[in-house]
Amino acid sequence: MSDQVLALRDHCPRIVAALAAAGRALVCTDFDGTLVPICEDPDDCVLDGSMRTTLAALHRPPRLQVAVVSGRRLVDVRRRVGIEGITYAGNHGLEIEGDGWAFREPNADACRRLVQTAAERLQPLIDAIEGARIEHKELTLTVHYRRVRTKDLPALRAAVGQLSSRVLGPGRLRLHGGKQVIELRPDVGWGKGQAVEWIGRRLECRGEHRVFIGDDETDEEAFAACGDGITIRIGDRGTPTAARYLAATGELSAFFMMLRRALDVRDTVRPAEAGHAGRRGDGEACRGI
Ligand SMILES: [Mg+2]
């Protein structure tokens, strides 16, 4: 946990002002539980239209760029967000696509067969547990148990735990926890933290002008890796986190709108007025949170 986790609402004027004034800034955000509420069925998660509009308006390269970094497959999260030109990272950063470029972590590709083997072995065991579901994401595998009765959870964990050392282990697949999920990911030393760092370098954005926002265990890796970046955990007061700032669900859209207004102010005033007008705009923007 950070030495002191701060409430985002108390510090947004300074954060918004810094990002609006930066020559190049980067806003990376998780999808499930961050841009959209967690759904009983992950297939039901849809990005709210006003959030889509705000994110699209924030993305104005090169001065501020938006990236969505998700545990979903890249094609899945891109379809659900549906904004052209921004960067998408899927499978916890193992696959990344930007405007005219693409990256896939090379060692993860070699684990695709292991992921397939794990899916084939787990499928009959998971099918026997009411409410459990496997999501095969090519480079990773997710076992969803949000709808599983408490009494059936030991059987589910036993099913995953029985996977042989030919599938699980150093250099093969590793187990990770999350919100009502167990994930199997390639043990290649690459996750959201490395992905955010890679995207930041690719888009030539300095560390202190990078933002990463998330709500789950996988995002904690990225918070820890973000160094002097701006890290925001979506959660309730008291949520343990390595992030610098904590925001309640629902505060994120207000933060994005404040940033949008601050960028608009800086884009519309004449350069000679930018210092004064920028300060005025930041103050106005932060009333809403
Ligand atoms: Mg999440």
Image: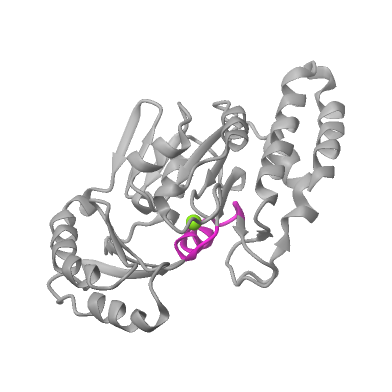
Which residue is located at x 29 percent, y 77 percent? 156
Residues rendered magenta in the picture: 215-231
Q: Is residue 126 left or right of residue 284?
A: left
Furthest-front residue in this view = 130
Quarter of the image where one finds residue 184? bottom left
Depth order, front residue of 237/231: 237
Q: Position of residue 122 (x, y in %)?
A: 19, 68
Depth order, front residue of 200/215: 215
Picture colour scheme: one colour
Q: Where is residue 277 in the image (x, y as percent from the top left)?
A: 85, 27
Quarter of the image where one finds residue 180? bottom left
Up-down relation of residue 128 to residue 80 (above or below): below
Depth order, front residue of 269/130: 130
Q: Is residue 26 left or right of residue 145?
A: right
Q: Where is residue 161 in the image (x, y as percent from the top left)?
A: 24, 79
Residue 137 in magenta?
no
Quarter of the image where one finds residue 254? top right
Up-down relation of residue 84 to residue 249 (above or below): above
Up-down relation of residue 83 to residue 240 (above or below): above
Which residue is located at x 63 percent, y 33 percent? 54
Up-down relation of residue 42 to residue 121 (above or below): above
